[in-house]
Image (tube, rainbow, N blue to C red):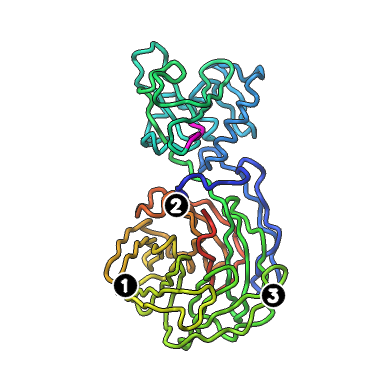
């Protein structure tokens, strides 16, 4: 979710057979490797669905538009492309098929809070709906159009799919300044968004971790597929301690704190088929922080005894003098986990299960909101590589993926769970992801 942000968006559609992970994660023994991660399927009937999959499903019918079983007929039904269900061969049936609904609402039914909510025309994204349930002028029955996407940055031209007659059509160069769309007054169309649609994301999450014996791990997760594609690669050497807190600065630089309050920089040499790193570089003492997170834009956040602090980092591989300008934001930050979601934005979980989001501007100047009111206490680590993507880690070794359509709106109504990346195998006691690798 943005994740909401324009389509950041899948390089391969969720409609295809999903991606299986190629390498095992660290097993419970900390030395052996687990089996490959399971494949990730497309959407389920009536479940969450990405915009890319909606367009892919719609395109399947469009590509078959001249087949005898895809003539327009309000009383006939045809299978979707994966044969999960048959859908009515008319405008609303086509939209229901694209959304993978487990029901057959008509055009008026699509304009119901069970399925959709209203948005402005400027907010339209691929897979949204233009629904004419107010047309009393043209003499045509109600009509539903599947919005395909904008054709210019000014949002003056767009394309869409329409199944109002034989054959199903794809229109390009459409405009809201036109008097009609498919014979219906343009002014009669309402912009609607399916409640279970989620924005596509693209990019990889680079995740470093620490095992209970102090060894480092490195894994990569394809955020679009929700699949681990690399690792976990485990170092042969140990840090010599288990960090109290850790923050990934970039692809090969990690900050960790020791149990005695020392801050160290860890320079990773390689993380491909093996994981090696140089001797930890001591940067100073007094770092009694329970949590650390870097926002990828020069600010390091830390919490010690409930006090949120912010530091400025001025080098990719900082020395002690490159971590400066400590600012005490405020007390009362009793978070159990901490991550950054963007420049000067943080998120974390509370013991009572709340998921919190914060916009931090300076000392005593911040805004917060509860994104989710309960159940998030199950996670002992929270990570975000950006783009509204969250990963939650449970103590049983499972890792879960979420997407927030707009991570900067202080509103959790558009935050959606996308299931497990792995049900087990993530045995690390500390985890941290490189920030801002997902757009």
Distance (Cα) linking label 2 and label 3: 35 Å
Mark with earlier residue (2, 3): 3
State whether the magenta stretch is mostly helix, strand or loop. Answer: strand
Distance (Cα) linking label 1 and label 3: 41 Å
Q: Give the foreground label among 1 and 2.
A: 1
Rendering coords of residue 209 (x, y %): 58, 72
Q: Would you name the residue on which mark 2 appears?
A: 404
Marking on residue 329: 1
Q: Mark 1 near mark 2, Cβ–Cβ under 8 Å?
A: no
Q: Outermost residue toward the left?
A: 364
In the displayed structure image, the side of residue 325 where residue 90 appears, left or right: right
Q: Is residue 150 magenta?
A: yes
Q: Would you name the residue on which mark 3 appears?
A: 31
Mark with earlier residue (1, 2): 1
In the displayed structure image, the side of residue 54 where residue 185 appears, left or right: left
Distance (Cα) linking label 1 and label 2: 25 Å
Vertical placement of residue 140 versus 9, above or below: above
The quadrant holding residue 286 is bottom left
Q: Give the foreground label among 1 and 3.
A: 1
Q: Mark 1 near mark 3, Cβ–Cβ under 8 Å?
A: no
| Rendered residue at 39%/24% (across/down) | 177
Q: Outermost residue toward the right?
A: 273
Q: Is residue 400 magenta?
A: no
Q: Nearer the viewer, residue 185 or 179?
A: 179
Q: Which residues are magenta?
A: 147-152
Q: Residues within 10 Å of mark 2 (few under 14, many from 20)?
A: many
Query: Tag 1's secondary structure?
Result: strand
In the displayed structure image, the side of residue 372 where residue 211 appears, left or right: right
Marking on residue 151: none
Q: Nearer the viewer, residue 430 or 319?
A: 319
């Amino acid at each position: 979710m943005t994740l909401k942000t324009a389509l950041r968006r899948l390089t391969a559609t969720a409609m295809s057979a999903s991606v299986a992970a190629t390498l095992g994660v660290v097993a419970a023994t900390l030395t052996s490797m687990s089996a490959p991660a399971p494949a990730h399927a497309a959407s389920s009937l009536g479940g969450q669905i990405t915009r890319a999959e909606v367009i892919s499903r719609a395109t399947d019918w469009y590509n078959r538009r001249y087949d005898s079983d895809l003539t327009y007929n309000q009383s006939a039904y045809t299978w979707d492309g994966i044969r999960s269900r048959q859908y009515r061969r008319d405008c609303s049936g086509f939209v229901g098929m694209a959304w993978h609904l487990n029901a057959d609402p008509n055009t008026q039914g699509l304009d119901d809070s069970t399925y959709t909510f209203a948005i402005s025309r400027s907010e339209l994204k691929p897979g949204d709906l233009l629904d004419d349930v107010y047309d009393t002028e043209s003499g045509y029955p109600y009509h539903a159009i599947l919005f395909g996407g904008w054709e210019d940055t000014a949002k003056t031209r767009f394309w869409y799919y329409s199944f109002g007659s034989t054959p199903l059509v794809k229109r390009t160069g459409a405009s809201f300044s036109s008097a009609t769309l498919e014979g219906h007054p343009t002014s009669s169309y309402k912009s609607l968004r399916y409640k279970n649609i989620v924005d596509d994301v693209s990019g990889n999450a680079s995740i470093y971790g620490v095992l209970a014996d102090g060894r480092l791990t490195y894994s990569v997760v394809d955020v679009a597929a929700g699949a681990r594609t690399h690792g976990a690669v485990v170092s042969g050497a140990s840090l010599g301690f288990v960090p109290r807190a850790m923050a990934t600065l970039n692809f090969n630089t990690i900050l960790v704190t020791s149990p005695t309050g020392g801050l160290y920089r860890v320079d990773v040499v390689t993380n491909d088929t093996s994981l090696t790193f140089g001797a930890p570089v001591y940067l100073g003492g007094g770092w009694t922080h329970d949590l650390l997170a870097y926002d990828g834009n020069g600010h390091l956040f830390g919490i010690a005894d409930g006090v949120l602090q912010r530091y400025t980092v001025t080098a990719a591989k900082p020395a002690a003098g490159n971590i400066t300008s400590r600012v005490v934001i405020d007390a009362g930050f009793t978070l159990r986990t901490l991550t950054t979601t963007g420049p000067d934005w943080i998120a974390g979980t509370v013991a009572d299960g709340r998921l919190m989001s914060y916009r931090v501007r300076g000392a005593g100047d911040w805004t917060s909101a509860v994104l989710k009111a309960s159940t998030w206490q199950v996670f002992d680590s929270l990570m975000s590589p950006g783009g509204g993507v969250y990963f939650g880690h449970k103590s049983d070794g499972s890792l879960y993926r979420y997407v927030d359509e707009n991570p900067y709106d202080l509103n959790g109504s558009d935050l959606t769970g996308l299931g497990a990346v792995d049900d087990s195998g993530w045995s690390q006691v500390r985890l941290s992801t490189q920030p801002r690798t997902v757009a």
